[in-house]
Amino acid sequence: MLARVTSLAVLGVDAYPVEVEVDLAPGLPVFNLVGLPDGAVRESKERVRAALINSGHFMPVNRITVNLAPADVRKEGAAFDLPIALGILAAAGSAPAESLLGLGVVGELALDGALRPVRGVLPMAAAARRQGLSALIVPEENAAEAAVVEGLTVLAARRLDQVVSHLLEREPLPRVAADPDLLLGQPLEYGLDLNEVRGQEHVKRALTIAAAGGHNLLMVGPPGSGKTMLARRLPTILPPLSFSEALEVTRVASVAGTLAGGKALVTERPFRSPHHTVSDVGLIGGGSVPRPGEVSLAHHGVLFLDELPEFKRQVLEVLRQPLEAGQVTVTRAAASVDFPASIMLVAAMNPCPCGFYGDPARACTCSPQQVRQYLARVSGPLLDRIDLQVEVPAVPFKELAADTAGPASAVLRAQVVAAREIQHQRLEGFGRFCNAQMNTALTRRFCALEPASLRLLERAMERFRLSARAYGRILKIARTIADLEASSAIGMAHLSEAIGYRSLDRGMP
């Protein structure tokens, strides 16, 4: 007898339907699994067999053939355990096959019949809705995540027995619903605040500008000057995620397996800080079956690279595409997939190998050639893509011991949100959300300069030998500074401050 069960699989950060076909035929008891399964899928034969027997069901002593269609796409993961088990029961007549029509099923089985969570349930739920499925059965820990998708009935199950009872109409599975407005309306608790950092007010100003316009930022200074402390507090002044942004962030986290168990939606902007030994695949994504890397895990958030020159040069160079395009395209023999990667890149580095070049309190032990070689580890094209370059000097004792603190993160966040609202109104019709995303045409349209400002920028371009890309980024920064002051026009002061954030272009060692 033949039975069919609809399941789903993930490719990149999207999902597609998979038809699980189960055929029971006379002959020696053999369990064949076809349809390009990987190792984890092939091992599902033993998990399904043990789960059926330990749940009190009969394992047919027939020739069992399971096909995962489409057969030309490689399948991976353990999410097919439950649909295979239900297909065997339906083919054997132990469960009504008609009850599986219009139903999506995913879930990993434990040997005792319990259901374990799987990765990528959010994109699976979205694909199930697109396919017109009436309901989706998922493990209980994945139910809240799947329920975020509107227009789909989500049924939560803890064990195989429960699913069979539901199909036999003995005991229905509980439905799970989620309220996105309630989830996004919960207050965020960061546990960090920018007013904890003493001094460095000019760096906090640069952080505010970066947050307001979505700009990339590089901090250069000696060890202990507070670069890492400042970077880790940047998310506290970023605007809250919108529902569409939260869905995109949650989708990536779901596929990568970083979504906390039972959590429905990621409501905080991600902050990722990979070690400098990370590989290019770990940073950008990839593998034989493409997986999202750190750049995609930081989507709509912050990617922080501490000790920037210590990263391998080839690793840093792969950042060029996501910084320009906001996405990563990974091509392998099996497939070509796109991963979202709209990030704010924040980096920190010392000015020289010993870290004390230009420090008035400690002498630098590096030769000029060592300093040049150290800075050359970061290529010019990559520096061109970093909007703000800020010097972070050592904090004087008086500022460290002072009782007064700078503005709290909540105060700066309010300024950032107000500036982002201005940008949203300006760019809404062009599919952009912040100044950093403006293309050349939009930059020319919304960053017009007066003649005096144009002459100032021309002198800066000639003196510092700035590239065309740096020219555009200066204009975008100036536009953001004007937005923070709610100014419709870019003034001379806005442009001068923007030019001042090109420290390395001005000849800093």
Image (spheres, helix red, strand yellow):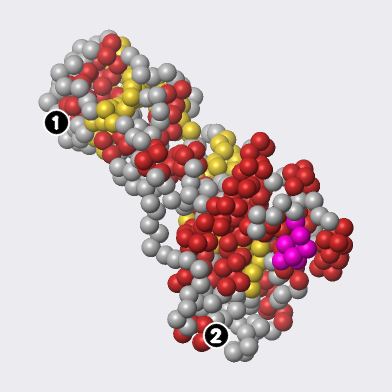
Q: How far apart, in angstroms, are the residues tagged by discs 1 and 2? A: 69 Å
Q: Which mark is residue 54?
A: 1
Between circles 1 and 2, the one closer to the viewer is 2
Q: Which residues are magenta?
A: 490-497
Q: Magenta region's main secondary structure? A: helix
Q: How many marks?
A: 2
Residue holding disc 2: 396
Question: Can you give x and y, in whole percent of width and height, for residue 81 in the image?
Answer: 29, 30
> Image height check: is 402 above or below 205?
below
Q: Secondary structure at mark 1?
A: helix
- Label 1 crowd bin: few (<14), some (14–19), many (20+), radius 10 Å: some
Judged left or right of residue 121, residue 12 is right
Residue 328's image quarter? top right
Image quadrant of residue 159?
A: top left
Identified at 42% across, 18% down, the residue is 132
Q: Is residue 499 left or right of residue 54?
A: right
Q: Percent x, y for residue 321?
A: 65, 48
Of residue 391 and residue 419, the one placed in the foreground of this image is 419
Residue 380 shows up from this direction: no
Quarter of the figure with the C terminus: bottom right
Whether residue 488 is situated above or below residue 346 in the rendered picture: above
Tell which of 48 and 259 is nearer to you.
259
Up-down: is 109 above or below 461? above
**Horizontally, is 22 left or right of 355 in the view?**
left
Which of marks 2 and 1 precedes in the sequence? 1
- Name the mark on residue 376: none
Q: Check if residue 246 falls in the magenta segment.
A: no
